[in-house]
Structures are given as structure tokens and as C-alpha cells.
Image: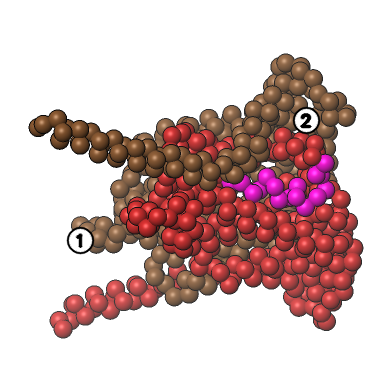
Chain colours: A brown, B red
Amino acid sequence: MDIAEKRKLTASSQKKSGKLRGIARKDLFWGYLMIAPLMLGLLIFYIWPVFQTFYFSFTSWGPFGNYQWTGLVNYQHLLSDPTLGQALRNTFIFTVLSVAGSMVVSLFVATLLNRKIRGLVVYRTIYFLPTVTMPAAIAIVWQWLYNGDYGLINYFLSLFSLHGPRWLTDPNIALYSITLIAIWGSIGNNMILFLAGLQSIPSVYYEAASLDGAGPAHKFFRVTLPLLSPTIFFVTVTSLISAFQVFDLIYLLFGTSDVVINSTQTVVYLFYKSAFVDNDKGYAAGIAMFLFVIILIVTIIQLQLQKRWVHYA
Amino acid sequence: MPKSLEITVQATRRSKLLGSVLTHAILIIGGIVFIVPFMWMILTSFKSLSESMLVPPVIFPAILHWSNYASALTTLPFVQFYENTVLMTIGRTVGQLVFCSLAAYAFARIEFPGRNLLFLLTLSVLMIPSYVFLLPQYMIMKNLGWLNSVQALIVPGLFSSFGTFLLRQYFMSLPLELDEAAKIDGANHLQIYWHVILPLVKPALIALAIFTILWSWNDLMWPLVVNSSSDKMTLSVGLATLQGEYFTNFPVLMAGAVLATWPMLLMFICLQRYFVEGIALTGSKG
């Protein structure tokens, strides 16, 4: 290769890399320009607030919104507060029962709907109605259905000579009554996720199982469940996170009642009450961080456990 | 056909029929559990107070008591609630569609230094429960003097890490050759985003719009916290207030519930295909 040729080559490669650099600079410009509005919004309203809440959890607030550093006082209070202990207990019972109940029922309904039956759209529409309904309206309607004297549910039970309880005013059962509402309200969403998961299982697996002489139960536990495990995992993680944060139903059904609220209040309700009713924003921030850590731990445990039972095809 | 085979065929047919009858029976009983609360809400909203408290209950009102709707509408500024809720819903939805799709395009289709780190930052917001942001968000509104205003209802909801993630996953599935072809024609990224990519991702945009509309319309805690004066309340908070004022008059409360929920129920029944596809999309891409 003579020098002239070499020079030519270097020149052309320089030209090329120069052009590339131009593209890279343009990409840099457009990339940052296009993410700027979102990133700015997230920084101001979401990312920075996490650090602020963390900071607030070490402060005490005066009546005029002034606050001062008080160290670990809020956390000491947290750990010795019987109300928070009760709220944690309520939240755990509600979360476990509502998530388990909703998943079992919605998986059952989804398998029924997966049989290419007639009227699929009608059933799907009806089961999904609560999901699009405002929680405030759901609370009012169920308060009426659950009414001890004039409610439809106790009337229905009386037809079978059963004496229905005071669903929402008896402190011993109020928590379970709202768990039922929550299950009723979340079946539609989970059912659609399960149905989509079921429909993505190739029918050859079932045909092969049939050839081996597998019955319906065997098919369900050996074919359906393992192949559906990614969907089951997704639904479990998201349902647990949202159930841990239950607020609307508690606020709407028990917010004005002093009697039942102790046996039904959840951690996020307590957060709301501390922050905006009692005006103890430092303590509220402590509660927020505390529940955040619990949710984080539960999610990490699930991510670890999933390696043992979730099969990705 | 040999006789034994004929019998098996008949038996399978019979068991299939039985199975399908059983399936429908279960689904219908379940369906009743789901639809009765809604029927009861509508029926009660037309009853007189004494009619609503009869034991055994009457199913249909003797005459339609529209006065319950009048009571709900006059006790509280419902028209104002509609206006606030609609403005909040439109504001958040338009904002999210614009901001999330712009960012999702950059995250999915432009290579620039720091991209992965910033995307990870966006994702981390998705993992954090919303009440952790609430106090500082409230303080920002308070310091801006925005408590009891429509912009307080809208602003933090303009930005969504969930929406960005959803759209980015969808944008990634489109072939990169589309961009290359447009680049050769001299288009810049904003032009490619607008003319090439956006028209191809309509299903994802519709899904995001539906999620945002639904979430905004039914949102309770944020509007409850920032707007306490009745002329700036949303339907959700208004309904809770109505509950406090009329807590034994269930016909009026039901009328309020019907007034607050019919737009979402109607939207769902008309657009249900998109709802279902949107939810399935979060399940498969999430």
C-alpha cells in the first residue's frame, strides 16, 4: 500500500467518524430534549419527595407548618405505638385474605371462560364492572347492601332463616366485610390477566397430556399451573402491593366512626390521619417509610422465591 | 359405526353438554353477585325514603322519585364537581400521553450516554408506593399557593413512570429499519416520533389513555388532601362529603353514586375491547 492510498483511507475514516460524531451529538441533543419534561416532573414530584419524606420522618411539626429535627423520636414512637400495631395487624389480615380470595376466584372464573363458551363478552363485561366503578360509589352501595336492618344481604339470609350480623358496625367482623368488598372489586382485573395468560398456552400441551391419558385435574395442576406461573407471579406481586396500601374503602366506610375504626384502620389510613387530621406530619412520614420498607422486603422475598416456582417458557 | 363406539361418542357428548350447562350455571350465579349491587344502586336511587326501608324490600319503586337526583344536585355543587373532575382527567391524560410518549421514544429508539441510568431511575419510581410522595407533593402545592385549585388536581399526575414504561416496551417492538429509512430522508427524531412511530403505536396510546382516565376519575386521596373547598372538589370527594351529610338517606346517596359513576361505566361498555387489551398488555409486558 503506498502512502497516498493510506492517506486516502485515513481521510475517509476520519470523515466517517466525524459524521458519526455528528449523529451522536444530534442523538444526545434529541434524547435529552425528549426526556427532559418527564425527567423534570419525576424529579420534582416523585424522586426528590422520597428523600424529603425520609428527612421529614426525623422531624417534628408545629401548628404552623414549621418543623425541627428531632432525630429518632418518630421511630421510637412508631415501635411503641399500639395503634400502629393494630393497624399493621389489620393490614396484614386484609392483604392476605383479599389477595388469596381474589386470586383463587379469578383463576377459577378465568378457566371457566377459557372454554370458548358462548356469551364470553357478556360475562366478562359484568365481572369487570366493579373495576371501573369509583371506590366512593362502591362504598356507598355496599354500605346499603350490608345495612343490618334494611340491607339486601341480611334480607336474603333471612329467607333461609339465618340471622345476618351487623356487617359494618360489629368491630369483630367489619374488617372481614370490607375484605369481601375488596375481593368482589378486584376479580375483574385479575380475571382478565389470567384469561390472557391461559390463552397464550399452546393447545399442543393439552393434546399431549390427553394422549398420555391425563384427566382434567391432572391437566390443571401439571400443565395449566406451571405454564401460567409467570402470570400468577405478576398478579401476586401487584395485588399484594396495592392491598398493602388500602385506604379508600377504610376512609369511606369507617372514617367517621370512632367505634369500628380501631379494628379496621390500616397503615395508610393511619398515615393519612396523622398527616392531615392530627397534623403530625413528621410521624406520618415515619409511618410512610416504615410501610415502604415492609413492602420492599415482601417484594424482595417474592422475587427470590419466584426462582423456585415460576417457569418462563 | 360399531355399537360400542357409538355409545362412547354419545357419552362424551352428554358429558360435554353437562359440563357446559354447569359452567354457565356457575357463571350466571357469579354474574348475579356482580350485577345486583349495580341494579340495587339504580333501583334505590328512584325510591322514596320510606320505600327504601321496607322489610321485605320491594324491588321496583312505585313511581320514579327523580327528586333524589334533585336533592343530590342541589345539596352539593355537582355540576362544579363534574367540571373539576373532567378538567383533572383531561389534563392528566393529555399530559401523560405527551410527556410519556416523548420520553418513551427517546428511551426506546435513541442511543445517548446516560440513557440506561435515567431509565433505571424512571423504573425505580414505579416501585415506590404513591403515599411516600404525598406529603412533599402537598407541601409543594401549599408553597405555590395552589391548594384548592384545578392545577393542584392536575400537576403531579402529568408525569408517570408507569406510562413511560408501558409505551417504551411497545416502542421497542417496532423494527429499527423504520427510523433508518426516515433518517436517510433527512428526518430528525421529533419528525420520526411524530410521523413514523406515533401512528404505529395507537393501541398502546389508547391503553395508557384509558388507564389514566380511569385512575383520575376515581382517584380519592390526592383530591381529598389538596382541595377541601367544595367548589374545587372532584366527584369522588364530593360523594364522600354527600355520604357525611345524608348518611341515612340512601336513595339520595344512590342518586349521587349513579351521577358520579355513569360516565366511566358508559365508557367501559362502549370501549371494553380496549380495556381488556390494555390490561392484558400490562400483564404480558410488565
Q: Position of residue B29 (x, y in %)?
A: 56, 68
Residue B167: give x, y in percent of width and height: 48, 52
Q: As rendered, which of A175 and A192 lies closer to the eye?
A: A192
**Is any atom of residue A239 visible in this view?**
no
When the figure is inspected, residue A70 is found, relative to residue B131, above or below; the finding is: above
Q: Residue at x 82, y 79 (%)?
A: B64
What SS does tag 1 mark? helix
Question: Which of the 4 image quadrants contains residue A155?
Answer: bottom right
Q: Which residue position is annotated with label 2? A: A281
Q: Does residue A303 appear to the left or right of B77 in the view shown?
A: left
Residue A163 in the image: above or below residue A246? below
Q: Label 1 belongs to which residue? A: A211
Write the start and end of the magenta stretch as one range.
B145-160
Pick the residue in front: B48 or B264: B264
Question: Which label sits in the foreground, 1 or 2?
Answer: 2
To the question of a shared chain for discs 1 and 2, the answer is yes
Q: CA distance from mark 1 to mark 2?
A: 64 Å
